[in-house]
Amino acid sequence: MRPPDDLLTPDGDTGGALLRDPPEKYTHFRLRQTHDRIVSSAQAPTDEYMGAVVASQFPSRCDRLLLIEDDLAGQGLGVTAHYLAIALLNAMRTGRVLLEVAVNPRWGPTNISIPYRQASAGASTPTLPSDRPRWCSRPPYTHQCFYQPWSNCTAGNTSLHQSPRLGQWNGLPGHALLPGGTPIVRIKLSGLYITPHHARVMGPAYGAAMRFLFRPREWVKHLGRCVLRRDGLVPRSFISVFIRHSVEKSTETRRFRYKMPVIDDYAASAEALSRAIQMQQVHIQTSSAVALANFTLRTSSLRLAARGPPLTLSYTDNPRSEHDTWGGWQKDKDETMDGTVAAVNAFIARHAAVLIAPRLSSWTNFLLILHQWLNVSSLGPPAENPQGGIRDGVGAPRTSLTRGGQRMTQDVKSRAVHLCCACASRGKRSNLVVVMGLALGRRWALRNATVPCATRTSAG
């Protein structure tokens, strides 16, 4: 699988196509900022939030812009998407259009040392902002390589770009982030990352912002459909499993003392689920070759023991590594393949009937928000823990039970089952989440919630 030579082939589906009504209908819709959140000024249905985003990004005049550089070295696409959505909400709140520009280390350098990265995964961890593109090494060197244009506006002359005033900790406090009289403000994503004030935001407007920013280009959809056809994956008739496994992730979990599911947990849940819902096809998302091989062996062994037909596994054909190599971890690398794989896997997962994924991963959040599988209110931003994830005790009503020493929580409203695989009884409530798509409905989650881990809950 490889991207086309021309990444910017015109798309038939433009941003304006998302507007079902004229832009004037949405001019009353505004966002206001409280002390710790960005919220809507009125209760509005999801399509109205999206309409407001599109109307804001496709204005009749392009005289007020917020330009952003993605320099978050070592951060995955899920975390990146979170902060880009926050940037878009800030732009909307102040009547600006958000545009992404290529990373330029010579423009407005900050030399910020990222505190979390400095303390997490060891000597190989990027701690300073990236000085090169992180996801696309070809023009335009931004996320627009893979996703549809954000606006009809352009960035304008570089000499007109103004940097905001930086606070005491190089953060971007609200009063200095977007000077009102400045036509074009240019910031770096690392500034938002280290500013907690701008990290605490969740709600329908946030979900609409993220979905707008990450609308795949036609060539991404084409590659995704090729994989679906090649492997015989019928929409809403297969399971998608995301396995987060790397040396750096293991180091992070030890540093911050939390437990990720092991590969056998993913395999046990997928195998039991496939028998329960009579789906034999499984789509696997993982950057680890070892995880892919071990998942294949484990599910085959479980199926053999159960005397059932083997699962049919599907995955993208691309290089894999036991280290995190994407998003700026490695220098002098063509990042375009990593961006392509991420975009294609997200598109494929959109067509799944069920998603099995680690709770403590921002990629899991990204998929659930992008495809509207889970209420945004039940998700937590990356600022609350190293890799984001689903918050405990927030959002939809849940019922809890214990089976065979394993804690299980059912998220009634969002059709989710939360599993706690080998995590301490006094720790997090879950580390693996199984989310049912609309094709299965909520009743399945309530009546057939026997989805096991391979490992048991520890004694605490």
Image: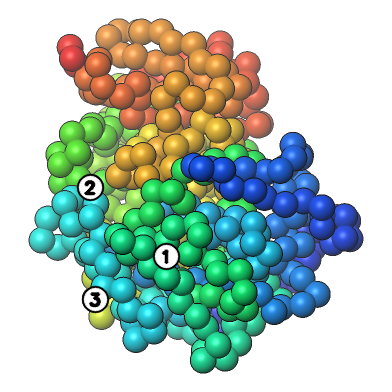
The residue identified by callout 1 is: 189
Residue at the image position 61 percent from the left and 62 percent from the top: 91
Q: CA distance from mark 2 to mark 3?
A: 19 Å
Q: Disc 1 vs disc 3: which is toward the camera?
A: 1
Residue 170 horizontal/vertical position (percent):
32, 64
Dot 2, how many residues are within 10 Å of its Cα: few (below 14), some (14-19), or many (20+)?
some
Instruction: Specify whether residue 161 is in view.
Output: yes
- First reached walking from the N terminus: tag 1 or tag 2: 1
- Label 3 is placed on what type of residue? Lys
- Label 2 is placed on what type of residue? Lys
Residue at the image position 23 percent from the left and 47 percent from the top: 249
The residue identified by callout 3 is: 331
Q: Disc 1 vs disc 2: which is toward the camera?
A: 1
- First reached walking from the N terminus: tag 1 or tag 3: 1
Residue 412 vertical position relative to residue 147 in the rendered view, above or below: above
Closer to us: 375 or 12: 375
Residue 154 vertical position relative to residue 13 in the rendered view, above or below: below
Residue 376 vertical position relative to residue 213 in the rendered view, above or below: above
Dot 3, how many residues are within 10 Å of its Cα: few (below 14), some (14-19), or many (20+)?
some
Closer to us: 110 or 211: 110
- Label 1 is placed on what type of residue? Leu
Quadrant location of residue 440? top right
